[in-house]
Structures are given as structure tokens and as C-alpha cells.
């Protein structure tokens, strides 16, 4: 929501990957980091000679454990640590997917992010009650097909809302 004061989430689009009684974990999908995929691959000693892969941006997935990597990807492959997030959207945290991407054996669509957004038990529910977040269904087109700068507006528009009419403070009906 426009009233979000935390700069980590202002106009952020966060894909909820896990939500249970212990808390929640999400990956922000519209924040650039200062890294490219080659920076990550080099650190893991994975070779990649394709500049179109090497120069892809790595996203800032959230403020928690920014050294931890996540690959959000299409549902066209399985790797050691893959979990389905939503129809057509998977998340993998194992090294083997990065090796596959570097060798052109990876998923057809993917984004790489470092870090995540995390909430303790009940924290996200409290924030939702306070109207801190808009909530919409996961959409693979937003994640994989849109430029980063267009993702927030498209996510808001998917709710049938004109973003310019949002107010920083909400009420309860």
C-alpha cells in the first residue's frame, strides 16, 4: 500500500512462497540488486560463456539473509530443492539449477534473487488486518514477462484498482 513506510517494501511486489502457522516467506520480484548472474555464478565457481545469461540482473529478494539465493522459474524442470509456489511458478534453492541455467539446460523462464522477506508467526496476518498490503493471485506473466519497473502497477491493476486512487491510510469495512 502507498502508506508502507519500510523502504524495503515501498511499491514492492512480493511473491509469497511459503505461509503457515510458523510464519511466511516471500521473494520481492521488482527490486534490482547491484549484481548480475555472472557475479553469482563466479562466486559459486560455475562457468558461463554466454553473455546474455551472465549479464542478467539478480534481484534483491528481500532484507533477510541476502546471501541466500532463490531461483523463481517456470514449471518445466525439477532440481534438487524445487517447490511449487503457484500454478506454473516454482522456486528452487539448490546449486544444480544455476549449473543448468549456465549450460542452457535450465527452465525456459526464470529470475534469480538474493535474500527474502520473512514474517514470524501471525505477523503477516496482523499486517494484512492493518491494510499494509494488497493481496492478489500469483501471476507468472508479471514475474517472468514484464520489466521490473512495470510489475507493481500490473499487480495493482490485476485487482481492478487504479493505483493513483490508493490512499496511504486505509479503513476497515
Image (cartoon, helix red, strand yellow):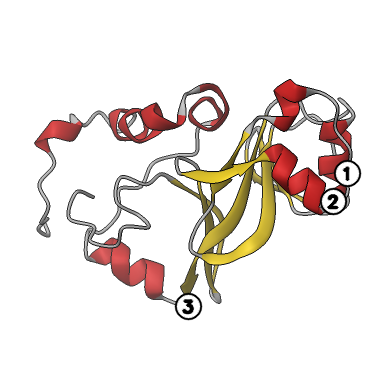
Circle 2 crowding by C-alpha within 10 Å: few under 14, some 14–19, many from 20: some
Q: Which residue is denoted by mark 1 in the rendering? A: 46
Q: What element carries label 3?
A: loop
Q: Quarter of the image holding residue 149?
A: top left
**Label 3: few (<14), some (14–19) or many (≥20) C-alpha neighbours in 10 Å:** some
Give the labeled residue for mark 2.
95
Residue 79 in view: no
| Residue 18 picture location, percent across and down | 58, 59
Residue at x 13%, y 41% (from the top left corner): 166
Residue at point 31% right, 58% down? 7
Label located before the other in sequence (2 or 3): 2
Q: Nearer the viewer, residue 21 or 78?
A: 78
* Viewer-proximal residue among 67 and 88: 67
Q: Are marks 1 and 2 in contact (CB under 8 Å)?
A: yes
Nearer the N terminus, badge 1 or badge 2?
A: 1
Residue at 35% from the left image edge and 47% from the top image edge: 135
- In the rendered view, tell whether residue 77 sits above or below residue 84: above
Q: Name the residue under label 3.
A: 121
- In space, the residues marked 2 and 3 are separated at their CA atoms by 29 Å
Q: In which quarter of the image is residue 75?
A: top right
Q: Nearer the viewer, mark 3 or mark 1?
A: 1
Q: Which residue is drawn at 86% across and 27% down?
A: 49
- Quadrant location of the C terminus? bottom left
Callout 2 secondary element: helix
Decide if residue 30 is on the left or right side of residue 27. Answer: left
Marks 3 and 1 sit apart, C-alpha to C-alpha, by: 37 Å
Indicate the position of residue 31 as horizontal and vertical percent values: 45, 44
How far apart marks 1 and 2 lie (CA) works out to 9 Å
Q: Which mark is in front, 2 or 3?
A: 2
Against 73, is 146 above or below? above
Q: Would residue 131 be found to the left or right of residue 105 on screen?
A: left
Query: Dot 1: few (<14), some (14–19), or many (≥20) neighbours within 10 Å?
Result: some
Amino acid at each position: 500500500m502507498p502508506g508502507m513506510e519500510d523502504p524495503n517494501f515501498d511499491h514492492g511486489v512480493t511473491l509469497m512462497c511459503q505461509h503457515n502457522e510458523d510464519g511466511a516467506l516471500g521473494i520481492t520480484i521488482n527490486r534490482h540488486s547491484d549484481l548480475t548472474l555472472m557475479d553469482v555464478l563466479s562466486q559459486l565457481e560455475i562457468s558461463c560463456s554466454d553473455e546474455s545469461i551472465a549479464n542478467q540482473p539478480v534481484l534483491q529478494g528481500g532484507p533477510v539473509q541476502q546471501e541466500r539465493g532463490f531461483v523463481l522459474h517456470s514449471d518445466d524442470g525439477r532440481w534438487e530443492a524445487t517447490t511449487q509456489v503457484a500454478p506454473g511458478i516454482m522456486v528452487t534453492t539448490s546449486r544444480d539449477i544455476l549449473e543448468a541455467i549456465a549450460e542452457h539446460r535450465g527452465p525456459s523462464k526464470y529470475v534469480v534473487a538474493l535474500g527474502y522477506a520473512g514474517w514470524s508467526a501471525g505477523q503477516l496476518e496482523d499486517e494484512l488486518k492493518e491494510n499494509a498490503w494488497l493481496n492478489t493471485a500469483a501471476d507468472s506473466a508479471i514475474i517472468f514477462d514484464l520489466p521490473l519497473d512495470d510489475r507493481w502497477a500490473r499487480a495493482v491493476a490485476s485487482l481492478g484498482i487504479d493505483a493513483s486512487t490508493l490512499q496511504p491510510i486505509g479503513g476497515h469495512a
